[in-house]
Structure formats: C-alpha cells, structure tokens
Image: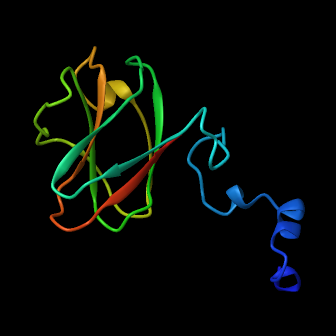
Amino acid sequence: MYKYQATPEKIDELFDFSLLRPRKHAKTVAEGDKENSLTLMVPPASVAVAEISFTDETKFSFYNSGSVNLGIFTASQPNAAVPSDVHLLPPDEELVIKASQLGAAGSTFLLVNNVQPAHYRRRTID
C-alpha cells in the first residue's frame, strides 16, 4: 500500500476497502451507493426523520460515524418523543436490527436522536 501512496486509485484495483470495516451481516453495500443507503445529519439536541419506507420485517444496518451516541427508534408520528428504551448506537459502532425491534409494530417513521448539545453527526443506513 505504501508503494501507491501517490496514486491511491491503483490500490482500489487490488483491494476492496469496504472489507476493512468489520460487518455483522453478509451483504456489503458499497459506500456511496445512493440506491441502498441514506446518510442523515442529526443536529444537536434534535431528532432527524429518515425519509424512507419500511415494514416491521425490514432489517436495517446502521453505522455511527460521529463522536456522540445516537438514539434510534421507530414511531407512528414524525414528531414522537424519544422513548426511554431507545437503542443507543455509540460512535464508530454498527447495529443490525429489524424495524420491529426499534418500536411498536406498524410504526412508519424511522427517527434518529442526537442528545448532545454541541455536535452534528452523520448516520449511514444501508
């Protein structure tokens, strides 16, 4: 790899860099794949709504690329309060989970909460 520091695009031909990050699922979605992933910016002390459709059986793969914990949950309304049993995703961690485990059955909104007062964070959902 050091041999190609000046021309990193040549390394891409030799190695799939998506393999460097451990995955907990079999299917790997290429980074930047706009069709199968979504990145959310979650402002401090707020909740962001993912503009996607899903069923109770939908399996999500989350990755927190930020430096603060993020709460992930589903709800029937986009302005729902953050539940006390929200799933927390620590920084630089992944979570693979079904929609039915994130909230009540039949929920139609996926929400991500940033409780920190001074950090913006990105969320990637595959």
Q: Quadrant of residue 83?
A: top left
Please identify the quadrant where the N terminus is shown.
bottom right
Q: Residue 73, percent across and down?
A: 26, 36
Q: Residue 36, percent across and down?
A: 58, 34
Q: Nearer the viewer, residue 42 or 23?
A: 42
1 w.r.t. 52: above or below: below
Horizontal arrangement in the rendering, residue 40 relative to residue 61 (left or right) = left
- The residue depicted at 10 percent of the width and 36 percent of the height is 81
- The residue depicted at 20 percent of the width and 28 percent of the height is 78
Horizontal arrangement in the rendering, residue 25 relative to residue 11 (left or right) = left
68 w.r.t. 24: above or below: below
Q: Residue 120, percent across and down?
A: 30, 61
- The residue depicted at 43 percent of the width and 19 percent of the height is 57
Q: Residue 116, percent across and down?
A: 18, 63
- The residue depicted at 85 percent of the width and 69 percent of the height is 11
Horizontal arrangement in the rendering, residue 116 relative to residue 11 (left or right) = left
Q: Quadrant of residue 47?
A: top left
